[in-house]
Amino acid sequence: MAKMANVPDKTKMPLWIPAFCYALMGPACAINAVFIALAIPAMAGHGIGGLIAAGAIGAVAGLLPALWLARKIHEGLKDDH
């Protein structure tokens, strides 16, 4: 029987794929958030604590692209345009 092209694969994603993707995306988003905080003059009054908070928020925001990338890797990185 032929496999349908539009049917998603129902296998469970291994834990190492999202962990690896977050290891890439988490620090990257945290660093970007700190650079954005450095560029905003209103953040100057918050000092080092503000930079740490911006980095933490960026690291949490890094979950979204990490999960997206993990899902794409698990699907096989196919481009159907």
Image: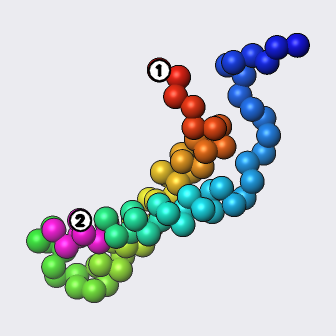
The answer to whether residue 57 of the structure is visible from this angle is no
Nearer to us in this view, 70 or 30: 70
Q: Is residue 40 magenta?
A: no
Amino acid carrying label 2: it is: Ile
Residue located beneath label 2 in the image: 36
Where is residue 2 drawn, in percent x and y? 82, 14
Nearer to us in this view, 55 or 20: 20
Amino acid carrying label 1: it is: His
* SS under mark 1: loop
For residue 10, side relative to residue 50 (left or right): right
**Crowding at label 2, few (<14), some or many (≥20) Cα neighbours within 10 Å?**
some
- The quadrant in which residue 54 appears is bottom left
- The quadrant in which residue 5 appears is top right
Where is residue 29 drawn, in percent x and y? 39, 63
Image point 34% across, 70% down: which residue? Answer: 31
From which residue to which does the magenta span run?
33-39
Image point 57% across, 37% down: which residue? Answer: 77
Where is residue 13 drawn, in percent x and y? 73, 48
**Crowding at label 1, few (<14), some or many (≥20) Cα neighbours within 10 Å?**
few
Q: Residue furthest left?
A: 41
Q: Earlier in the sequence, mark 1 or mark 2?
A: 2
Nearer to us in this view, 67 or 57: 67
**3D distance between C-alphas at marks 1 and 2:** 34 Å
Q: Is residue 35 magenta?
A: yes
Image point 15% across, 67% down: which residue? Answer: 40
* SS under mark 2: helix
For residue 63, side relative to residue 13 (left or right): left
Residue located beneath label 1 in the image: 81
Dominant secondary structure (helix, strand or loop) of the stretch shown in magenta: helix
Question: On the rendered image, what quadrant is the N terminus found in?
Answer: top right
